Amino acid sequence: MIINRIRTFAIASILAFSAATGSAQDLLARQAPVDRRSAAADTIVLQSLRHREEMENPSSDLYPTWENRYAHKATPMPDVYRIDLRGFCMPTPSRVITSNFGRRWGRWHKGLDIKVYIGDTIRAAFSGKVRIVDYEASGYGKYIVIRHNNGLETIYGHLSKQIVTENQYVRAGQPIGLGGNTGRSTGSHLHFETRLCGVALNPALMFDFPNQDVTGDFYTYRSSTIDDESAQATAARGKASSRGYSRENIQGNGQISHGNINHNAVRRQAQPRRTENEQANSGAQMRYYRVEAGETLENVAEKCGVSVEKLCNLNHFGRFTVVRKGQLVRYS
């Protein structure tokens, strides 16, 4: 009798446990769709908050403050930083570079000069927030500074008209101003700068104006190699690679309807850089010499068989420019 009772109790316990387990599984099964919906809702909320933060203060992880007083003010710079170039728009359809980034007339030129005509449409290179709309008589003239979500700030100088306001959010390709000849300028053109943490980077590292494209989906800034890369970028995509200085070599006159963005943003991987020898042999008129430690302009001129004056003219150097080890100097 006792054995039968024990057996009955054991069977009843097993059945009760099975029923409880089944009920728990049913509860979990019913709860799973709710959890998935909650997770999806949380993701949407986070994305919305992130988008709102980017619109209010782009690249807040790089820049400690948002202020409208200085066109550029150097802040702590990372040794390595990856810049997303996707979703870009060329600021102008002009292919003609009239002045390179670097030493020019005894002072540093911290952007590219692109040939445009007064009234040509200038567009935001990336989406971002307008930080400054101002006028500088002895420099930029009428200019605009935009901070972008990829960490860059772009500056557009010598405009004839600004058509955006400070703290306005703009999309890539949105018209922001008109080409002009204001400020310290000797002819109508767009002065275009790209800066990271307030430090000027050669736009030719990222933008290929002659081919109306960017150099790749991403550009990785490295403090250890930036000087060499900048010189190579100028040699490959700077003034010497432009196809002349006339309206015929400018695609249209810049008057493009609103929203006509460069759709090459959805395209190929970065093209491989040409080697220094390939650059030198690509045309009889362009040859470069890499400076060695301790060399001066006089040493370079003697080794290359040209005059110091010719080096200065070809590279926009001053007579007493100090060249650095590893720097590429054009000598023909």
Image (cartoon, rainbow, N blue to C red):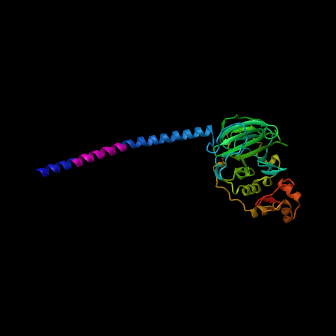
Residue 127 among those drawn in magenta: no
> Residue 190 occupies which quadrant of the picture?
top right
User: Residue 330 location in percent, x, y?
Assistant: 81, 59
Residue 18 included in the magenta stretch of the image: yes
Instruction: Pick whichever, 12 or 77, lies toward us.
Output: 77
**In the image, residue 323 lies at what x, y percent?**
80, 58
Quarter holding the C terminus is bottom right
**Of residues 81 and 253, which is closer to you in this image?**
81
| Left or right: where 126 falls relative to 159 | left
Q: Is residue 217 visible?
A: no
Q: What is the count of numbered marks?
A: 0
Q: Residue at x 68, y 39 (%)?
A: 174
Most prominent secondary structure in the magenta stretch? helix
63 on left or right of 312:
left
Instruction: Point out residue 68 in the picture as x, y percentages from the top left corner.
Output: 70, 36
* Residue found at the very far left of the displayed protein: 1
Magenta segment boundaries in residue numbering: 13-29
The answer to whether residue 20 is seen in the rendering is yes
Q: Does residue 304 lie above or below 146 as drawn?
A: below
Residue 219 x, y percent position in the rendering: 66, 52
